[in-house]
Image (spheres, rainbow, N blue to C red):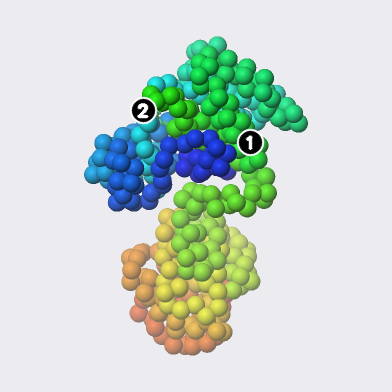
Amino acid sequence: MKLHEYQSKKIFERYEVPIPKGRVANIASEAKQIAEELGGRVVIKSQVLVGGRGKAGGIRLAKDPKQAKEIATDILGMEIKGLPVRKILVDEIVDIDQEIYLGIINDRNFRQPVVIASSSGGVDIEEVAQFSPEKIFKLAIDPLLGLQDFQVRDIALGIDLRREYWKQFIKILRGLYRAFNESDATLAEINPLVITKDKRLIALDAKMIIDDNALFRHPELMEFRNLDIEAPAEIEAQKYGLSFIKLDGDIGCMVNGAGLAMATMDIISQFGGNPANFLDIGGGAGTPKVAAALRIILSDPKVKVILINIFGGITRCDEVAKGILSALGDVKTNIPVVVRLVGTNAEVGRNLLVDAKIQTAETLVEAAEMSVLLSNGGAS
Ligand code: GDP
Ligand code: MN
Protein backbone atom coordinates (compact mmCIF):
# COMPACT_ATOMS: atom_id res chain seq x y z
CA MET A 1 0.00 0.00 0.00
CA LYS A 2 1.43 3.31 -1.08
CA LEU A 3 0.79 6.16 1.27
CA HIS A 4 0.18 9.72 0.24
CA GLU A 5 2.64 12.40 1.22
CA TYR A 6 0.32 13.79 3.89
CA GLN A 7 -0.19 10.32 5.35
CA SER A 8 3.51 9.53 5.37
CA LYS A 9 4.15 12.86 7.04
CA LYS A 10 1.69 11.96 9.79
CA ILE A 11 3.69 8.82 10.47
CA PHE A 12 7.01 10.69 10.33
CA GLU A 13 5.65 13.16 12.82
CA ARG A 14 5.00 10.35 15.30
CA TYR A 15 8.69 9.46 15.06
CA GLU A 16 9.84 13.03 15.58
CA VAL A 17 10.93 13.60 12.03
CA PRO A 18 10.30 17.34 11.58
CA ILE A 19 7.80 18.24 8.87
CA PRO A 20 6.47 21.61 7.73
CA LYS A 21 3.32 22.90 9.40
CA GLY A 22 0.32 22.19 7.25
CA ARG A 23 -2.85 20.29 6.63
CA VAL A 24 -4.62 18.38 3.92
CA ALA A 25 -7.65 19.84 2.14
CA ASN A 26 -10.33 18.59 -0.21
CA ILE A 27 -11.65 21.91 -1.45
CA ALA A 28 -10.10 25.21 -2.47
CA SER A 29 -11.76 27.31 0.24
CA GLU A 30 -10.13 25.10 2.87
CA ALA A 31 -6.75 25.84 1.29
CA LYS A 32 -7.45 29.54 1.75
CA GLN A 33 -8.31 29.03 5.39
CA ILE A 34 -5.21 26.95 6.04
CA ALA A 35 -3.09 29.60 4.33
CA GLU A 36 -4.59 32.20 6.68
CA GLU A 37 -3.72 30.03 9.67
CA LEU A 38 -0.18 29.57 8.41
CA GLY A 39 0.45 33.25 7.89
CA GLY A 40 -0.22 33.59 4.17
CA ARG A 41 2.61 32.08 2.16
CA VAL A 42 2.06 28.39 1.48
CA VAL A 43 2.92 25.64 -0.92
CA ILE A 44 0.00 23.74 -2.45
CA LYS A 45 0.82 20.13 -3.16
CA SER A 46 -1.32 17.69 -5.13
CA GLN A 47 -1.74 14.38 -3.30
CA VAL A 48 -1.47 11.72 -5.96
CA LEU A 49 0.44 8.48 -5.77
CA VAL A 50 3.02 9.25 -8.44
CA GLY A 51 6.41 10.89 -8.33
CA GLY A 52 7.42 14.01 -10.20
CA ARG A 53 4.45 16.06 -9.15
CA GLY A 54 6.59 19.17 -9.06
CA LYS A 55 7.56 18.87 -12.71
CA ALA A 56 3.99 18.09 -13.68
CA GLY A 57 2.78 21.39 -12.19
CA GLY A 58 1.21 19.71 -9.18
CA ILE A 59 3.24 21.70 -6.64
CA ARG A 60 2.97 25.47 -6.57
CA LEU A 61 3.79 28.28 -4.21
CA ALA A 62 1.16 30.84 -3.19
CA LYS A 63 2.05 34.24 -1.80
CA ASP A 64 -1.19 34.85 0.07
CA PRO A 65 -4.48 33.10 1.00
CA LYS A 66 -6.30 34.48 -2.04
CA GLN A 67 -3.73 33.05 -4.40
CA ALA A 68 -3.72 29.83 -2.36
CA LYS A 69 -7.38 29.42 -3.19
CA GLU A 70 -6.80 30.07 -6.90
CA ILE A 71 -3.92 27.63 -7.12
CA ALA A 72 -5.84 25.06 -5.07
CA THR A 73 -8.72 25.34 -7.54
CA ASP A 74 -6.34 24.76 -10.44
CA ILE A 75 -4.58 21.83 -8.85
CA LEU A 76 -7.80 20.16 -7.68
CA GLY A 77 -8.91 20.20 -11.31
CA MET A 78 -5.75 18.53 -12.53
CA GLU A 79 -4.93 15.04 -13.56
CA ILE A 80 -1.33 14.00 -12.97
CA LYS A 81 -0.08 11.06 -14.98
CA GLY A 82 -3.67 9.93 -15.36
CA LEU A 83 -4.62 10.29 -11.70
CA PRO A 84 -7.20 12.89 -10.71
CA VAL A 85 -6.17 15.14 -7.83
CA ARG A 86 -8.67 14.70 -5.00
CA LYS A 87 -6.68 16.17 -2.14
CA ILE A 88 -4.07 18.83 -1.67
CA LEU A 89 -1.61 19.36 1.10
CA VAL A 90 -1.24 22.97 2.16
CA ASP A 91 2.09 23.48 3.89
CA GLU A 92 3.97 26.49 5.17
CA ILE A 93 6.69 27.59 2.78
CA VAL A 94 10.18 26.69 3.78
CA ASP A 95 13.17 28.61 2.48
CA ILE A 96 15.56 26.04 1.14
CA ASP A 97 19.33 26.17 1.33
CA GLN A 98 20.09 22.57 0.36
CA GLU A 99 18.12 19.50 -0.70
CA ILE A 100 19.22 16.09 0.54
CA TYR A 101 17.87 12.68 -0.38
CA LEU A 102 17.29 10.19 2.43
CA GLY A 103 15.50 6.90 2.01
CA ILE A 104 15.29 3.40 3.38
CA ILE A 105 14.24 0.48 1.23
CA ASN A 106 13.98 -3.23 1.67
CA ASP A 107 16.75 -4.32 -0.64
CA ARG A 108 16.19 -7.74 -2.12
CA ASN A 109 19.82 -8.16 -3.14
CA PHE A 110 21.19 -7.26 0.27
CA ARG A 111 18.24 -9.00 1.93
CA GLN A 112 18.33 -6.19 4.43
CA PRO A 113 17.03 -2.69 4.76
CA VAL A 114 19.36 -0.30 2.97
CA VAL A 115 19.71 3.38 3.73
CA ILE A 116 20.25 5.51 0.66
CA ALA A 117 21.44 9.08 1.03
CA SER A 118 22.67 11.80 -1.27
CA SER A 119 23.67 15.41 -0.95
CA SER A 120 22.00 15.95 -4.33
CA GLY A 121 18.39 15.47 -3.33
CA GLY A 122 15.35 17.07 -4.87
CA VAL A 123 13.45 16.20 -7.96
CA ASP A 124 16.07 14.44 -10.07
CA ILE A 125 17.40 11.72 -7.80
CA GLU A 126 16.93 9.07 -10.51
CA GLU A 127 19.24 11.05 -12.78
CA VAL A 128 21.78 11.47 -10.02
CA ALA A 129 21.74 7.71 -9.51
CA GLN A 130 22.22 7.12 -13.22
CA PHE A 131 24.78 9.77 -14.13
CA SER A 132 26.62 10.48 -10.86
CA PRO A 133 26.32 7.27 -8.86
CA GLU A 134 29.27 8.36 -6.74
CA LYS A 135 26.93 10.91 -5.18
CA ILE A 136 24.69 8.18 -3.83
CA PHE A 137 25.66 6.65 -0.52
CA LYS A 138 24.25 3.25 0.46
CA LEU A 139 24.50 1.30 3.65
CA ALA A 140 22.83 -1.95 4.67
CA ILE A 141 21.38 -2.38 8.14
CA ASP A 142 21.31 -5.68 9.94
CA PRO A 143 17.68 -5.90 11.07
CA LEU A 144 18.65 -7.79 14.21
CA LEU A 145 21.20 -5.22 15.31
CA GLY A 146 19.26 -2.22 14.05
CA LEU A 147 20.76 1.06 12.98
CA GLN A 148 24.08 1.56 14.80
CA ASP A 149 25.52 4.90 15.85
CA PHE A 150 28.64 4.44 13.74
CA GLN A 151 26.46 3.75 10.71
CA VAL A 152 24.52 6.95 11.17
CA ARG A 153 27.85 8.81 11.34
CA ASP A 154 29.09 6.98 8.23
CA ILE A 155 26.06 8.17 6.35
CA ALA A 156 26.44 11.77 7.52
CA LEU A 157 30.08 11.63 6.44
CA GLY A 158 29.10 9.91 3.21
CA ILE A 159 27.00 12.84 2.11
CA ASP A 160 29.48 15.47 3.38
CA LEU A 161 27.02 16.83 5.87
CA ARG A 162 28.43 19.71 7.87
CA ARG A 163 28.99 18.89 11.57
CA GLU A 164 26.55 21.54 12.75
CA TYR A 165 23.70 19.50 11.20
CA TRP A 166 24.68 16.09 12.54
CA LYS A 167 22.59 16.22 15.66
CA GLN A 168 19.41 16.96 13.72
CA PHE A 169 20.33 14.48 11.00
CA ILE A 170 20.94 11.64 13.45
CA LYS A 171 17.58 12.19 15.06
CA ILE A 172 15.84 12.22 11.68
CA LEU A 173 17.54 9.10 10.38
CA ARG A 174 16.81 7.26 13.61
CA GLY A 175 13.17 8.34 13.44
CA LEU A 176 12.93 7.37 9.79
CA TYR A 177 14.37 3.94 10.50
CA ARG A 178 11.95 3.35 13.35
CA ALA A 179 9.04 4.53 11.21
CA PHE A 180 10.17 2.17 8.46
CA ASN A 181 10.64 -0.74 10.80
CA GLU A 182 7.62 -0.39 13.01
CA SER A 183 5.26 0.24 10.08
CA ASP A 184 6.50 -2.83 8.18
CA ALA A 185 7.36 -0.54 5.32
CA THR A 186 9.20 -1.56 2.19
CA LEU A 187 10.08 2.08 1.54
CA ALA A 188 10.34 5.22 3.65
CA GLU A 189 11.71 8.17 1.76
CA ILE A 190 12.35 11.86 2.31
CA ASN A 191 13.07 13.69 -0.90
CA PRO A 192 13.97 16.37 -0.32
CA LEU A 193 15.16 16.51 3.23
CA VAL A 194 16.00 20.19 3.27
CA ILE A 195 18.38 22.34 5.16
CA THR A 196 16.54 25.60 5.57
CA LYS A 197 18.06 29.06 5.39
CA ASP A 198 17.66 29.22 9.16
CA LYS A 199 19.61 25.98 9.55
CA ARG A 200 16.86 23.51 10.34
CA LEU A 201 16.48 20.06 8.77
CA ILE A 202 12.92 19.39 7.61
CA ALA A 203 11.27 16.57 5.63
CA LEU A 204 9.69 18.56 2.81
CA ASP A 205 8.35 15.53 1.01
CA ALA A 206 7.48 12.09 2.35
CA LYS A 207 6.73 8.76 0.84
CA MET A 208 6.03 5.38 2.36
CA ILE A 209 5.04 2.01 1.01
CA ILE A 210 3.68 -0.49 3.50
CA ASP A 211 3.97 -4.21 2.94
CA ASP A 212 0.40 -5.34 2.22
CA ASN A 213 1.10 -8.68 3.85
CA ALA A 214 1.76 -6.91 7.12
CA LEU A 215 -1.26 -4.65 7.04
CA PHE A 216 -3.19 -6.88 9.40
CA ARG A 217 -0.68 -5.90 12.06
CA HIS A 218 -1.47 -2.23 11.56
CA PRO A 219 -5.11 -1.48 12.20
CA GLU A 220 -3.98 2.13 12.78
CA LEU A 221 -2.93 2.33 9.12
CA MET A 222 -6.22 1.06 7.78
CA GLU A 223 -7.64 4.58 7.92
CA PHE A 224 -4.99 5.46 5.34
CA ARG A 225 -6.43 3.12 2.78
CA ASN A 226 -6.71 5.24 -0.28
CA LEU A 227 -10.39 5.53 -0.80
CA ASP A 228 -9.85 7.71 -3.82
CA ILE A 229 -8.04 5.03 -5.72
CA GLU A 230 -10.69 2.50 -4.85
CA ALA A 231 -13.57 2.25 -7.25
CA PRO A 232 -15.71 5.33 -6.54
CA ALA A 233 -18.78 3.17 -7.16
CA GLU A 234 -17.92 0.99 -4.17
CA ILE A 235 -17.61 4.04 -1.94
CA GLU A 236 -20.96 5.34 -3.20
CA ALA A 237 -22.51 1.93 -2.57
CA GLN A 238 -21.25 1.92 1.02
CA LYS A 239 -22.97 5.25 1.57
CA TYR A 240 -26.33 3.70 0.74
CA GLY A 241 -25.67 0.46 2.60
CA LEU A 242 -25.50 -1.56 -0.60
CA SER A 243 -23.18 -4.53 -0.88
CA PHE A 244 -21.46 -3.92 -4.17
CA ILE A 245 -18.47 -5.54 -5.78
CA LYS A 246 -17.33 -4.48 -9.20
CA LEU A 247 -16.53 -7.28 -11.62
CA ASP A 248 -15.27 -7.38 -15.18
CA GLY A 249 -18.30 -8.38 -17.20
CA ASP A 250 -21.00 -6.39 -18.98
CA ILE A 251 -24.26 -7.50 -17.36
CA GLY A 252 -25.13 -5.23 -14.46
CA CYS A 253 -26.97 -7.06 -11.69
CA MET A 254 -29.28 -5.74 -9.03
CA VAL A 255 -30.61 -8.34 -6.66
CA ASN A 256 -31.98 -8.54 -3.14
CA GLY A 257 -30.11 -10.97 -0.94
CA ALA A 258 -26.53 -12.15 -1.25
CA GLY A 259 -27.51 -15.74 -1.98
CA LEU A 260 -29.92 -14.75 -4.71
CA ALA A 261 -27.29 -12.37 -6.12
CA MET A 262 -24.79 -15.20 -6.38
CA ALA A 263 -27.37 -17.54 -7.89
CA THR A 264 -28.19 -14.83 -10.43
CA MET A 265 -24.53 -14.47 -11.36
CA ASP A 266 -24.19 -18.24 -11.67
CA ILE A 267 -27.13 -18.46 -14.02
CA ILE A 268 -25.76 -15.60 -16.10
CA SER A 269 -22.48 -17.50 -16.41
CA GLN A 270 -24.30 -20.65 -17.30
CA PHE A 271 -25.81 -18.89 -20.31
CA GLY A 272 -22.35 -17.70 -21.33
CA GLY A 273 -22.67 -14.15 -19.97
CA ASN A 274 -20.44 -12.15 -17.63
CA PRO A 275 -21.76 -10.22 -14.64
CA ALA A 276 -20.46 -6.66 -14.31
CA ASN A 277 -20.93 -6.67 -10.58
CA PHE A 278 -22.33 -8.25 -7.49
CA LEU A 279 -24.97 -6.04 -5.94
CA ASP A 280 -27.19 -6.87 -3.02
CA ILE A 281 -29.72 -4.18 -2.14
CA GLY A 282 -30.56 -6.06 1.04
CA GLY A 283 -33.96 -6.57 2.57
CA GLY A 284 -36.63 -3.88 2.60
CA ALA A 285 -34.82 -1.45 0.32
CA GLY A 286 -36.84 1.65 -0.44
CA THR A 287 -36.94 3.83 -3.53
CA PRO A 288 -33.79 5.93 -2.85
CA LYS A 289 -31.65 2.87 -2.27
CA VAL A 290 -32.87 1.17 -5.42
CA ALA A 291 -32.31 4.34 -7.41
CA ALA A 292 -28.76 4.64 -6.03
CA ALA A 293 -28.06 1.02 -6.92
CA LEU A 294 -29.20 1.56 -10.47
CA ARG A 295 -27.15 4.75 -10.80
CA ILE A 296 -24.06 2.91 -9.55
CA ILE A 297 -24.55 0.11 -12.07
CA LEU A 298 -25.12 2.63 -14.86
CA SER A 299 -21.92 4.51 -13.98
CA ASP A 300 -19.91 1.54 -15.30
CA PRO A 301 -19.31 2.21 -18.99
CA LYS A 302 -18.86 -1.50 -19.68
CA VAL A 303 -22.42 -2.34 -18.73
CA LYS A 304 -24.51 -3.30 -21.78
CA VAL A 305 -27.61 -4.58 -20.04
CA ILE A 306 -29.02 -4.56 -16.53
CA LEU A 307 -30.71 -7.49 -14.92
CA ILE A 308 -32.87 -6.76 -11.92
CA ASN A 309 -33.89 -9.81 -9.98
CA ILE A 310 -36.10 -9.18 -6.97
CA PHE A 311 -37.73 -11.73 -4.79
CA GLY A 312 -40.14 -9.62 -2.79
CA GLY A 313 -40.48 -10.55 0.84
CA ILE A 314 -39.93 -7.60 3.11
CA THR A 315 -38.71 -5.86 -0.02
CA ARG A 316 -41.78 -4.54 -1.80
CA CYS A 317 -41.75 -4.87 -5.56
CA ASP A 318 -43.68 -1.61 -6.03
CA GLU A 319 -40.94 0.24 -4.08
CA VAL A 320 -38.34 -1.36 -6.31
CA ALA A 321 -40.27 -0.37 -9.42
CA LYS A 322 -40.46 3.22 -8.19
CA GLY A 323 -36.73 3.21 -7.55
CA ILE A 324 -36.06 1.96 -11.05
CA LEU A 325 -38.27 4.65 -12.55
CA SER A 326 -36.67 7.31 -10.42
CA ALA A 327 -33.14 6.31 -11.44
CA LEU A 328 -34.06 6.02 -15.09
CA GLY A 329 -35.56 9.50 -14.83
CA ASP A 330 -32.28 10.87 -13.45
CA VAL A 331 -29.86 9.02 -15.65
CA LYS A 332 -30.91 8.99 -19.25
CA THR A 333 -29.74 5.76 -20.75
CA ASN A 334 -30.35 3.51 -23.71
CA ILE A 335 -29.14 0.47 -21.87
CA PRO A 336 -31.83 -2.21 -21.85
CA VAL A 337 -33.18 -3.27 -18.47
CA VAL A 338 -34.56 -6.72 -17.81
CA VAL A 339 -36.64 -7.10 -14.67
CA ARG A 340 -37.90 -10.09 -12.87
CA LEU A 341 -40.16 -9.20 -9.98
CA VAL A 342 -41.89 -11.79 -7.86
CA GLY A 343 -43.37 -11.73 -4.39
CA THR A 344 -44.81 -8.88 -2.35
CA ASN A 345 -46.68 -6.36 -4.53
CA ALA A 346 -45.13 -7.83 -7.69
CA GLU A 347 -48.25 -7.14 -9.70
CA VAL A 348 -48.32 -3.46 -8.70
CA GLY A 349 -44.61 -3.20 -9.42
CA ARG A 350 -44.86 -4.73 -12.86
CA ASN A 351 -47.76 -2.44 -13.76
CA LEU A 352 -45.67 0.58 -12.80
CA LEU A 353 -42.99 -0.53 -15.24
CA VAL A 354 -45.27 -1.14 -18.20
CA ASP A 355 -44.64 2.21 -19.81
CA ALA A 356 -40.91 2.32 -19.28
CA LYS A 357 -38.46 0.76 -21.72
CA ILE A 358 -38.16 -2.28 -19.55
CA GLN A 359 -38.51 -5.92 -20.37
CA THR A 360 -40.04 -8.13 -17.79
CA ALA A 361 -39.38 -11.81 -17.37
CA GLU A 362 -41.37 -14.40 -15.50
CA THR A 363 -38.54 -16.55 -14.22
CA LEU A 364 -34.91 -16.03 -13.34
CA VAL A 365 -33.82 -18.42 -16.08
CA GLU A 366 -35.77 -16.46 -18.64
CA ALA A 367 -34.40 -13.16 -17.34
CA ALA A 368 -30.81 -14.39 -17.39
CA GLU A 369 -31.15 -15.80 -20.90
CA MET A 370 -32.66 -12.53 -22.12
CA SER A 371 -29.86 -10.50 -20.52
CA VAL A 372 -27.11 -12.61 -22.01
CA LEU A 373 -28.71 -12.32 -25.42
CA LEU A 374 -28.92 -8.54 -25.07
CA SER A 375 -25.35 -8.28 -23.86
CA ASN A 376 -24.26 -10.06 -27.00
CA GLY A 377 -26.02 -7.45 -29.06
CA GLY A 378 -29.20 -9.50 -29.49
CA ALA A 379 -32.52 -7.89 -30.36
CA SER A 380 -34.12 -5.87 -27.61
P1 GDP B 1 7.72 15.65 -6.03
O1 GDP B 1 8.04 16.46 -7.25
O2 GDP B 1 6.47 14.85 -6.25
O3 GDP B 1 8.85 14.84 -5.53
O4 GDP B 1 7.35 16.71 -4.87
P2 GDP B 1 8.23 17.41 -3.71
O5 GDP B 1 7.40 17.55 -2.52
O6 GDP B 1 9.53 16.72 -3.55
O7 GDP B 1 8.47 18.87 -4.26
C1 GDP B 1 9.22 19.11 -5.43
C2 GDP B 1 10.05 20.34 -5.25
O8 GDP B 1 9.21 21.45 -4.98
C3 GDP B 1 11.03 20.28 -4.10
O9 GDP B 1 12.22 19.61 -4.44
C4 GDP B 1 11.24 21.74 -3.82
O10 GDP B 1 12.26 22.24 -4.66
C5 GDP B 1 9.91 22.38 -4.19
N1 GDP B 1 9.19 22.68 -2.95
C6 GDP B 1 8.32 21.90 -2.28
N2 GDP B 1 7.92 22.50 -1.13
C7 GDP B 1 8.57 23.68 -1.07
C8 GDP B 1 8.65 24.75 -0.12
O11 GDP B 1 8.03 24.76 0.93
N3 GDP B 1 9.46 25.79 -0.41
C9 GDP B 1 10.17 25.84 -1.57
N4 GDP B 1 10.94 26.88 -1.79
N5 GDP B 1 10.16 24.86 -2.47
C10 GDP B 1 9.38 23.80 -2.23
MN1 MN C 1 9.87 14.69 -3.79
Q: Locate the N terminus by quadrant.
A: top right
Q: Is residue 42 left or right of residue 238?
A: left
The structure residue drawn at horizontal position 50% and vertical position 59%, both measured from the top left corner, is 234
Q: CA–CA distance between discs 2 and 1? A: 28 Å
Residue found at the very far right of the displayed protein: 144
Q: Can you give x and y, in whole percent of width and height, for residue 327 in the image?
A: 38, 71
Q: Secondary structure at mark 1?
A: helix
Q: Which residue is mark 1?
A: 178
Ligand 1 is within 8 Å of the C-beta of the residue at disc 2: yes
Q: What is the three-letter code of the residue carrying label 1?
A: Arg
Q: Secondary structure at mark 2?
A: loop
Q: Residues within 10 Å of mark 1 (few under 14, many from 20)?
A: some
Q: Residues within 10 Å of mark 2 (few under 14, many from 20)?
A: few
The structure residue drawn at horizontal position 64% and vertical position 25%, both measured from the top left corner, is 114
- Which numbered disc, 2 or 1, marks the residue that appears first in the sequence? 2
Q: Is 101 situated above or below 268?
A: above
Numbered-mark total: 2
Q: What is the three-letter code of the residue carrying label 2?
A: Asp
Q: Which residue is mark 2?
A: 95
Q: Is 341 situated above or below 159?
A: below
Q: Can you give x and y, in whole percent of width and height, for residue 206 in the image?
A: 49, 35
Q: Can you give x and y, in whole percent of width and height, for residue 208 in the image?
A: 55, 37
Q: Is 79 situated above or below 172?
A: below
